[in-house]
Amino acid sequence: MTTTNSPGLFIAFEGGDGAGKSTQASLLADAMEARGLTVLRTREPGGTPIGEKLRSLVLDHGHGHIDAHTEALIFAASRAAHASQVIRPALERGDVVLTDRYIDSSVAYQGAGRDLGTDVVRTLNEWATSGLQPDLTVLLDVDPADGRRRRTAGDAAEDRLESEADEFHTTIREAFLKLAATRPDTYLVLPAHLPVHELAAQILSRTDSLLATARGAA
């Protein structure tokens, strides 16, 4: 079902910071494993040893100024390793791969948020991943102010991108919604403020439909 023509299923979770992506990925992983499927949960930036080092460089405070072009290239480099070393092999094994962020995050954050151009950033990342695309992208749409309240609950510290102004996060939100509108067949857009288990049920229903289609085509 992916561009690799592999037997696995590839789902990306996208949305603004504080949208609840990790929570929903975890719940879907549990549901898929309960069905006897092998699930790989991963994240971006990261997912590989080099990716985790790059994650620290680009998200942690204290590394000095990082210009927009450098930021975009760091994310693309991490994603290249992730796609080649982790995601493709798992899909070729027939696993269900759930990633917290993928290409559309770079398109939204660096392409729109940093004003580098969404087409330019998408082209860079499609080259970095050799065209590997998710079967489904789950977009949890969160209001920027609500997202900030969620991620700072309990005095949690924000990373370098999370600490950007709400105007930046509003641009990100609009970019995600535009991306979803251009590819409605491969997107599931859900309001992040819905109850956790209601969101999980809708995501599971869409995933089950994808699995049924894949099995029917096999």
Image: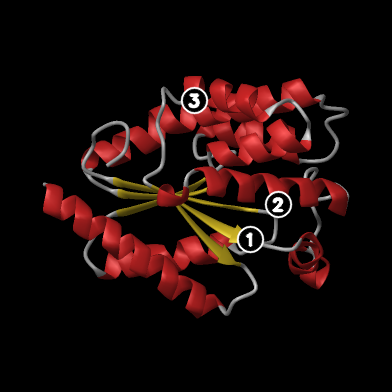
Give the crowd class for mark 3: few <14, some 14-19, many >=20 residues within 10 Å.
some
Quote the CA–CA distance across marks 1 and 3.
24 Å
The number of numbered badges drawn on the structure is 3
Taking the image as shown, residue 121 lies to the left or right of residue 49, namely right
Q: Nearer the viewer, residue 176 or 95?
A: 176
Q: Which residue is mark 1?
A: 141
Residue 30 in sight: no
Residue type indicated by callout 1: Asp
Of residues 19 and 188, the one nearer the viewer is 188
Report the side of 113 relative to 206 (left or right). Answer: right
SS type, badge 3: helix
Percent x, y of residue 81: 48, 27
SS state under label 1:
strand
Mark identifier at residue 126: 3
Q: Residues within 10 Å of mark 2 (few under 14, many from 20)?
A: many
Residue 2 in the image: state x and y as whole percent. 31, 38
Q: Residues within 10 Å of mark 1 (few under 14, many from 20)?
A: many
Q: Amino acid at mark 3?
A: Glu
Q: Are marks 2 and 1 in contact (CB under 8 Å)?
A: yes
| Cα gap from disc 2 to disc 3, whole angstroms | 21 Å
